[in-house]
Amino acid sequence: MYEDKTLVCKECGTEFLFSAGEQEFYAARGFQNEPQRCKSCRDARKNAARGPREYFSAVCAACGGDARVPFQPKSDRPVYCSECFARMKEEAASS
């Protein structure tokens, strides 16, 4: 029913693909307009509206190293650096 379409981004002028799957997704959600911006322009626009992210320093509860996190750490909860957090997440997924 749907076919891939090539659209032109109104922001940067580059061509981008509006796939059949994306069209089906848009139709299922009731969206009537096709996207007017490519993915990178949509992402840039979204991030510009959000503003810069503030990071906080903390000590990793697992390795004792420096952890930079996007939230204000609380003393009653452990904080992990990205390496330890990823390792713990991977261990939990394999269990």
Image (cartoon, rainbow, N blue to C red):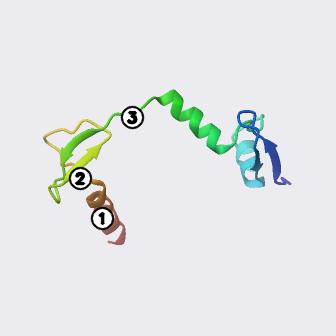
- Inspect the image, locate mark 1, and give the three-letter code of the amino acid beneath it: Arg
Of label 3 and label 2, which has the lower sequence position?
3
Q: CA distance from mark 3 to mark 2?
A: 19 Å
Label 3: which secondary element:
loop
- Dots 3, 2 in contact, CB < 8 A: no
Query: Label for residue 80?
Result: 2
Name the residue carrying label 1.
87
Q: Look at 21% across and 39% down and name the residue there.
A: 73
Q: Look at 72% across and 43% down and name the residue there.
A: 26
Name the residue carrying label 3.
53
Residue 33 on image: x %, y %: 77, 34
Q: Nearer the viewer, residue 64 or 22?
A: 64
Circle 2 Cα neighbour tier, 10 Å, few/some/many (<14 / 14–19 / ≥20): many
Q: CA distance from mark 3 to mark 1?
A: 24 Å
Q: On the picture, is 54 further left or further right than 12?
A: left
* Vertical comparison of 45 with 93: above or below: above
- Inspect the image, locate mark 2, and give the three-letter code of the amino acid beneath it: Tyr
* Vertical comparison of 32 with 89: above or below: above
Q: Look at 31% across and 65% down and name the residue there.
A: 92
Q: Residue furthest bottom?
A: 94
Label 1: which secondary element:
helix
